[in-house]
Amino acid sequence: MSKPALKPKNPSQNLPQDIDEPSIAKPLARLVAIVYDGMLILALLFLVGTVLTVIGTLLTMQSGTSANEAQSLPSWYQNLVMTPAFVLTLIGFYGLFWRRGGQTLGMQTWRLKTVNQDGKLLTWGQSVKRILAACLVPAVLAMVGYLIGGSRQILLTSAFLGLIFNYLFCLFNQRGLAVQDLLSNSMTLKMPKVAHVGILEGFRNRNKQP
């Protein structure tokens, strides 16, 4: 007796049910990713600030023996050494991750990926341009707030509102792009699960990019 013919399987049954295409990331997901990354960035800035404070103290100040003799670092050292170092730390953090895999650690958690308009990883020049573009509105609002209120608290609050504005702009842009997306000719995508690439794999595959 011959065996009955096997019924061919439907290929679609073997495919994941949540396959979709990359889409422009929503503002909320991007803000949450910033919070995740912010904790790591603060730790890096604290480390850099501590090292530079020790170096600056040894080079520019005489050590005292009491609290009354405590001094602050010279303003020129803070403005010409420490501030640029903080900026370079920020650029290095985002630039390194964007260049290697398009994702920071926070972005990986929410399956976000930053690329240029051609879908390729950002160059160092594009990374720096995007970071500066993201700082433009917060910096302008911070200066306006300081001129009006004249306090550090108002300055920081105004800068924070500028950061929020960058992403609220997505709600009014037809393509859902943020301010830094438009100014740097780049975009942040929400990647489907099947196309998600982890940080380590992104670093390994970086050299394979055309």
Image: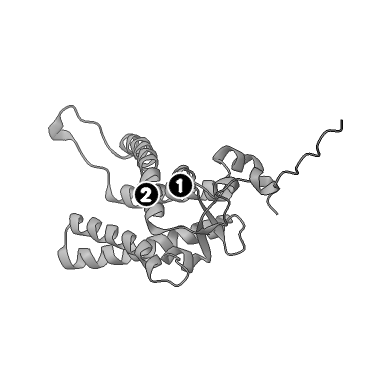
Amino acid found under the numbered disc labelled 2: Val
- Image marks 2 and 1: residues in contact by CB distance under 8 Å: yes
**Residue for badge 1:** 110
Q: Which element is circle 2 on?
A: helix
If you read the primary sequence from the N terminus, does the residue marked by circle 2 or circle 1 appear first? 2
Q: Quadrant of residue 71?
A: top left
**Residue for badge 2:** 32
Task: Find the residue positioned furthest to the front.
Answer: 1
Q: Quadrant of residue 157?
A: bottom left
Q: Residues within 10 Å of mark 2 (few under 14, many from 20)?
A: some
Residue 86 shown left or right of residue 100 in the figure: left
Coordinates of residue 109 in the picture (x, y in percent)? 46, 43
Q: CA distance from mark 2 to mark 1?
A: 8 Å
| Identity of the residue drawn at 24% across and 68% down | 144
Coordinates of residue 56 in the picture (x, y in percent)? 34, 39
Coordinates of residue 76 in the picture (x, y in percent)? 31, 51
Q: Is residue 209 above or below residue 176?
A: above
| Identity of the residue drawn at 35% across and 64% down | 168
Q: Which element is circle 1 on?
A: loop
Given residues 90 and 111, the one toward you in this image is: 111
Circle on res. 5: none
Given residues 22 and 51, the one toward you in this image is: 22
Amino acid found under the numbered disc labelled 1: Trp
Task: Find the residue positioned furthest to the left.
Answer: 68
The quarter in which the N terminus is drawn is: top right
The quarter in which the C terminus is drawn is: bottom right
Q: Is residue 52 above or below residue 124?
A: above
| Identity of the residue drawn at 37% across and 62% down | 167
Residue 176 shown left or right of residue 69 in the figure: right
Given residues 179 and 188, the one toward you in this image is: 188
Task: Find the residue positioned furthest to the top.
Answer: 65
Given residues 175 and 117, the one toward you in this image is: 175
